[in-house]
Every structure is written in structure tokens, then in C-alpha cells.
Image (cartoon, rainbow, N blue to C red):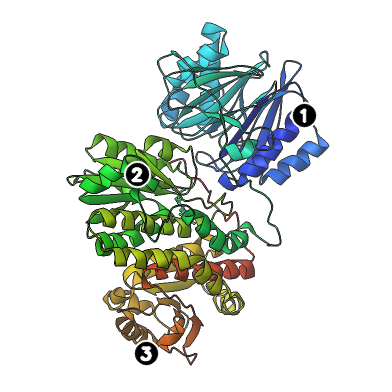
């Protein structure tokens, strides 16, 4: 959450910082600010609202100077307001931008107040600024002040500090929140995400956990947690897709929905050979791991958790291996059983989700045979800390609502499960069947997208509603959950998903003619059971919106509206049926006039717990 950009250069950096913030706005967008050193003064502009408010303010009140820091915020401590916006400044000397949460901020604040420091904001970040200022009094050196201060912080931080009398340097510190250094020609940059810096450099170096670094125009010196110098080289960025613009689309989310045929084709490219999937695409060590594997534990959050739930159905059916799936924020705080020879899998679009990362670290200490990350961001924390990593190759996803990241996660998971099943003796003919299903996906998704005009019409029915239900069975139950999450996330309509067999155990009481019920009903062995559940709803006046194969012979009638989604392969139907639900939530949100790409209270990358 939140975005950080910083620069040490000979030219004015305000424009670079603001462009970086624009590119990071998907991470948080309730306020933004910039501070730049000029003639031994720190000049600061902050605004409530989006980066546009800040850039408008800077157009009227430009800031000059070559050393500066900037931030776009997703509030944790203290409401979104100008006073709580970063950068925060201690006195007039030391400015800071920070991502993360300092858990012992209250205790530190009391100590600092006792020493005479005054607080103007409700943030934990201002505590960091004052503590570094206090340490600076002892050392007169910003680097050692930061090194001494970070030892006193409990919690997570990615932070950048500057001192008004030391415009030649930025001091950066990382623990739990990513920070990347970008090297230009005679200038250096820092950011919480490479994307922010792509207009100025492609040479990057990530700080590791606990490191503090001194960044000048021409040099970078990194120090480990215990103060030793660390040598590491910059590397050329492997990001292939820049943020780009929205092209002909009104929102990033719609663009990303329509990118799914290409995104999935990218996920599959070079990974399927001669009708089969080899374990080596998951890394050198994968062969040995898959051969001895006896159980799988998947941990993830939100949409990525839904991908994990689908994978459980696939894993137990195709590979005949027990698979447990759990939300990371629960998993990390309970004592759990570690099965023998078990693989720990994390799924994450960003690779930086705090709870998922904490669960991985816990798993590594608790005796799992190995770990694997399914991720969309090369070089992210999850990727670097897992034994094996598999890139989903969705390309940058800017809309907060995850779309192409989800379907590429599913395609990756299916490849993984087939590769594992191959080691467990799955017949070649079966492998070929799954591979064909994967290869057919881009075409099937394109056909599902053709239903867009009909879905746009149906969306009108939802725009005045306050509640809705989503039903599915088997591997479509997680797809119903994903559909409900999308709708609530961007349209703010309350949406709940149920495994359809659960209806009569409680939720049926909610059904009346005001309640829209979305059903994902592909042609499979559970369809007849699902039809009975739908009759239970119709008999009570509920309005059904059914996404089904044309061969199932559903027709529009009183209380039922049908969208045909033809999926030729049962195993990949969860992927294909996701598309119409994404389109439905998108159109409802557009009709309701919500902020589709940056819905209220949310952020793209959840780096705080
Ligand atoms: C879904 O639309 C959300 N953006 C959210 O649920 C997301 O999937 C979750 O926060 C996990 O993020 P990750 O995939 O980056 O770990």
C-alpha cells in the first residue's frame, strides 16, 4: 500500500517524482505529497485526494531542486487528510516518506513527547521522523541516525529520509515493505515499485530485508541489518509491459479484461511442449520435489485465494494429492499441521502481500519440504523468498480489481497440477486432454467476451440493488466467490457467494423478488443438482441470472435471464466463466458511477497486515 518515489539528481526532479506517483497511484490514492530540498530548505506540497490534486497544486506553486521524495497514501494511522499526508518533517530538518506500519508507534511517541517533540499528524510515520531527528542529535550523520532509529521500530517499513543540509543523499531503509533503487546517468532514484521509475531507468536493485542504504547521485552503499557493507549489482529490469495508457478503453479494468486472451497465451507460451507439461518450467529443483510430493498447502488472500480454491478441486481430482487452502491472515496466526513431504504454495499478483509473505516465512520455519510462488511480479519478495517461482506473465495490472492476474493464476495452477500429476503417473492421454483444454483457452475466452453487449444490458437490473447472491457448485463455487468479490469491490453492492447446496441451510431466507441471484452453471455432472437449487430460488420469487452452456437449454422466462457461455472443456470452465462475471461487475460499477479502477478504501498491493 502507498507509493514512494525519491530522486537525487542535478536537474529539477519534481516532474519525475509526480510522474512516478501517477504510476504508483494504483497502490493508494487518498492523499499525495512531495518535498524537495532547495537552498538548505525543505519545501513541501501535500494534497488530499489523488495525484492530480497534487500536480495541479504544483503547477501553481512549483518546487525546484534536485533532491526530493514523494508519496501517495493509503491511510492506516490517521484519516486521509492533508495533515496526515506524507512527506512528514521533523522540525524543518528531516523529511520522510514511509510505507508500512510501525506497531510500537504509541510507545515511541510517548517517549518523544517527553523529550519535547510536537506531533502535527495522527500518523505512525511522524514518529519515525522525530526518532531519526533525535538520533541525529547524537551523531550528526543521517545514515547512522537512521541505522540507530530502525533498531527501535517494530513493524513494517519501506522508508526514505532526507536532511535539508545534506541534499547530496537519500537514506533508505527496508523491513517488510519493498524498496527498489534505480540507477540513471549521474543520478539515482528510489521507489516502492520499479513501475514508478521506468521513464528514467531500467537498471534496478532491490533492498533486502533489514538493509539500510545511502544513495547519492553516483553511488549506492548498502548496509545489512548488523551494519556490514553489502555489495550487490544493479540488474536490467525484466518488466516487458509498461503501464501504458488505457488505449480505446474507458478504464484499465476493461482493458485488462479484454487483454485476457493474450495474457493467457503469454502464460502458456513455451511452457507446453509436444502436448505435455514438464516440471522443469517450475525450476531445476522441481523434478525432485514433485517426485516426492505427498501433500500441498496453498495460502493466499482475496482473489488469489479464490484461485487457490479452484486449484484444490483440480489437485485432488487430477493429481490425487491432498490439498489444503487457507487465507493467509488466518494461516499465519494459528498452529497448523504440516503434512509429510508437503509443498507450500503462495499465490499473489503483487508478490508483496504482507499476510502471504508472513505465512511463507512461517512455513519455511515449520518443516515444509519446499515452497513455490505463483506470482505476476518477477523480483518481488514472495518470488525471491520461495524455493521455486512461476511467473503468471499477465503483464502489469493497474485496475485494483484483479482480472487478468486471476485467470493467468488459474492457467498457471492447472499447468502446475498437470506437471505434478505426470510425476504421479497420470496417463499420457489424460495429460494431452488437459493440455488441449489449456491451449483452447484464448479462443474460448474471446468467445465469452462476445457476450459483453448482453451483459451490459443485464447490468441495468443490478444498479439499484443493495444485495445480491452468487451461486456455484464444485470448482465453480470459488468462481461464484470471485464474482461476488468483484461486484462488491467496485460497485459497492453487497454480494455473497454460496455453494448452491448450502442455500436451504440458511440463505434461502434472504430470497424475495428484490434479490438478484447470479448462477454459474456450466454443463457438468453437478448441473442437475444446481437446477434443483435454482428451482428453490424461483419458487420464492428470486430473479435468476444464469450463465450457462447453450446445450443446457436454459431459456429466458419469468424470473430467469440467461447468458450463454460455451466452454468446451470442463476442466477450464472455471476460467472461462470468470469473464462474464468480471464484465457484469464492471458494467454495474460504470452505471453506478463509482471509481472503477480505484474503488474507495482499497489499494492494489496490500503490504500492511
Ligand atoms: C481483488 O480484486 C483484490 N485486488 C484483492 O482481493 C487481491 O487479490 C488481494 O489483495 C491479494 O493480492 P495479491 O494477489 O497481490 O497477493
Task: Classify residue 330 as left or right of residue 367.
Answer: right
Dot label at residue 63: 1
First along the sequence among labels 1 and 2: 1
Tag nearer the camera, 1 or 2: 2
Q: Residue at x 61, y 40 (%)?
A: 195
Q: Nearer the viewer, residue 209 or 77?
A: 209
> What is the x, y in percent for residue 428?
29, 63
First along the sequence among labels 1 and 3: 1
> What is the x, y in percent for residue 497?
39, 68
Q: Examine the rendering and report whether any part of residue 431 can be seen.
A: yes
How crowded pointer 1 is (Cα within 10 Å; few <14, some 14-19, many 20+) is rated as: many
- Does mark 1 have its CB less than 8 Å from ligand 1? no
Residue under numbered circle 3: 539
Q: Is residue 386 above or below residue 391?
A: above
Q: Residue furthest right?
A: 60
Residue under numbered circle 2: 372
Amino acid at each position: 500500500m502507498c507509493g514512494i518515489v525519491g530522486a537525487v539528481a542535478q536537474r529539477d526532479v519534481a516532474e519525475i517524482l509526480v510522474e512516478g506517483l501517477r504510476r504508483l497511484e494504483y497502490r493508494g490514492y487518498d492523499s499525495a505529497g512531495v518535498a524537495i530540498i532547495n537552498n538548505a530548505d525543505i519545501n513541501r506540497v501535500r494534497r488530499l485526494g489523488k495525484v492530480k490534486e497534487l500536480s495541479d497544486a504544483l503547477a501553481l506553486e512549483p518546487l525546484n531542486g534536485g533532491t526530493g521524495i514523494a508519496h501517495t497514501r493509503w491511510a492506516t494511522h490517521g484519516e486521509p487528510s492533508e495533515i496526515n499526508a506524507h512527506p512528514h518533517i521533523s522540525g524543518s530538518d528531516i523529511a520522510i516518506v514511509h510505507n508500512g506500519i510501525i506497531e510500537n508507534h504509541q510507545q515511541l511517541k510517548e517517549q518523544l513527547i517527553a523529550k519535547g517533540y510536537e506531533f502535527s499528524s495522527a500518523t505512525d510515520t511522524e514518529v519515525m521522523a522525530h526518532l531519526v531527528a533525535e538520533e541525529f542529535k547524537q551523531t550528526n550523520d543521517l545514515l547512522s541516525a537512521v541505522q540507530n532509529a530502525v533498531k527501535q521500530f517494530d513493524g513494517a517499513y519501506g522508508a526514505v529520509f532526507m536532511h535539508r543540509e545534506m541534499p547530496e543523499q537519500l537514506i533508505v531503509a527496508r523491513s517488510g515493505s519493498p524498496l527498489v533503487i534505480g540507477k540513471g546517468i549521474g543520478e539515482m532514484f528510489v521507489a516502492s515499485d520499479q513501475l514508478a521509475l521506468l521513464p528514467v531507468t531500467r537498471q534496478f536493485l532491490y533492498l533486502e530485508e533489514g538493509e539500510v542504504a545511502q544513495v547519492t547521485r553516483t553511488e549506492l552503499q548498502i548496509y545489512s541489518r548488523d551494519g556490514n557493507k553489502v555489495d550487490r549489482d544493479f540488474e536490467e529490469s525484466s518488466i516487458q509491459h509498461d503501464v501504458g495508457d488505457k488505449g480505446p478503453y474507458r478504464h484499465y479494468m476493461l482493458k485488462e479484461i479484454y487483454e485476457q486472451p493474450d495474457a493467457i497465451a503469454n502464460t502458456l507460451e513455451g511452457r507446453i511442449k509436444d502436448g505435455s507439461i514438464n516440471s522443469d518450467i517450475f525450476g531445476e529443483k522441481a523434478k525432485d520435489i514433485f517426485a516426492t510430493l505427498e501433500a500441498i498447502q496453498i495460502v493466499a488472500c482475496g482473489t488469489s485465494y479464490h484461485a487457490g480454491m479452484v486449484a484444490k478441486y483440480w489437485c485432488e481430482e487430477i493429481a490425487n494429492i491432498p490439498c489444503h487452502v487457507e487465507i493467509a491472515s488466518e494461516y499465519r496466526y494459528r498452529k497448523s499441521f504440516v503434512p509429510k513431504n508437503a509443498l507450500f504454495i503462495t499465490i499473489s499478483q503483487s508478490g508483496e502481500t504482507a499476510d502471504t509473505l508472513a505465512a511463507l516465512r512461517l512455513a519455511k520455519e515449520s518443516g515444509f519440504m519446499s515452497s513455490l510462488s505463483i506470482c505476476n511480479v518477477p523480483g518481488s519478495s514472495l518470488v525471491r523468498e520461495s524455493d521455486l517461482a512461476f511467473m503468471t506473465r499477465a503483464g502489469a495490472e493497474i485496475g485494483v480489481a484483479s482480472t487478468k492476474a486471476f485467470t493467468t493464476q488459474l492457467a498457471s495452477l492447472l499447468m502446475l497440477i498437470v506437471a505434478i500429476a505426470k510425476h504421479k503417473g497420470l496417463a499420457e492421454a489424460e495429460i494431452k486432454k488437459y493440455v488441449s483444454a489449456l491451449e483452447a483457452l484464448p479462443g474460448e475466452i474471446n468467445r465469452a467476451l462476445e457476450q459483453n453487449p448482453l451483459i451490459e444490458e443485464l447490468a441495468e437490473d443490478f444498479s439499484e440493488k443493495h444485495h445480491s447472491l452468487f451461486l456455484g457448485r464444485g470448482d465453480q463455487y470459488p468462481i461464484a466467490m470471485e464474482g461476488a468479490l468483484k461486484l462488491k469491490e467496485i460497485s459497492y453492492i453487497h454480494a455473497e457467494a454460496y455453494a448452491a447446496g448450502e442455500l436451504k441451510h440458511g440463505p434461502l431466507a434472504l430470497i424475495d423478488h428484490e434479490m438478484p441471484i447470479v448462477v454459474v452453471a456450466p454443463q457438468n455432472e453437478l448441473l442437475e443438482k444446481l437446477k434443483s437449487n435454482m428451482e428453490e430460488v424461483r419458487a420464492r420469487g428470486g430473479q435468476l441470472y444464469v450463465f450457462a452452456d447453450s446445450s443446457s437449454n436454459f431459456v429466458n422466462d419469468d424470473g430467469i435471464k440467461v447468458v450463454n457461455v460455451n466452454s468446451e472443456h470442463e476442466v477450464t470452465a472455471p476460467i472461462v466463466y470468470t469473464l462474464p462475471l468480471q464484465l457484469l461487475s464492471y458494467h454495474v460499477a460504470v452505471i453506478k458511477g463509482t471509481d472503477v479502477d480505484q474503488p474507495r478504501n482499497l489499494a492494489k498491493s496490500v503490504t500492511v497486515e
